[in-house]
Image (spheres, helix red, strand yellow):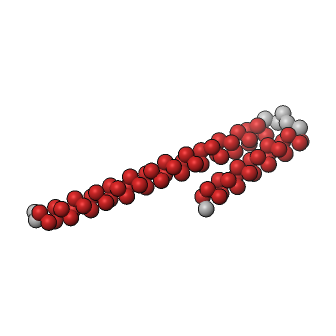
Amino acid sequence: MNPKTNLIDAGRDRVAEKASDDFLEALRKLAHTLSQPLTSLRGSVEVALMGELNESECRQVLELALQESHRLAETLE
């Protein structure tokens, strides 16, 4: 095979590997960013579903869940 072709193929492979690494890093950052609001949202819904809250407490929990859902939406925009 032509040495020039090998050099081009090696360069292309490095670019593809870098793009793949960058993509995976972006996914890791997104997962980390989404983790906290998702955990909070899930916890809020679980507390509300326990059925042990009065109306005011339940409303506060649902408001928190709504805030967290807005935060998730903003992260994804």
Side (left or right) of 33 relative to 14: right
Q: Quadrant of residue 77?
A: bottom right
Residue 30 position within the rendered picture, expressed as x and y whole percent measured from the top left? 54, 51
Q: How many marks?
A: 0
x 82%, y 36%: residue:
51
Residue 73 position within the rendered picture, expressed as x and y whole percent measured from the top left? 65, 57
Side (left or right) of 4 relative to 51: left
x 74%, y 42%: residue:
45
In the rendered view, tell whether residue 53 sits above or below residue 70.
above
Side (left or right) of 70 relative to 16: right
Which residue reaches farthest right?
55
Q: Nearer the viewer, residue 66 or 7?
A: 7
In the rendered view, tell whether residue 26 sits above or below residue 48.
below
Query: Which quadrant does the N terminus fall into?
Result: bottom left
Q: Quadrant of residue 20?
A: bottom left
In the rendered view, tell whether residue 72 sits above or below residue 6.
above
Residue 18 position within the rendered picture, expressed as x and y whole percent measured from the top left? 35, 56
Q: Quadrant of residue 50?
A: top right
Q: Nearer the viewer, residue 34 or 42?
A: 34
x 84%, y 33%: residue:
52
Residue 6 position within the rendered picture, expressed as x and y whole percent measured from the top left? 16, 61
x 21%, y 64%: residue:
8
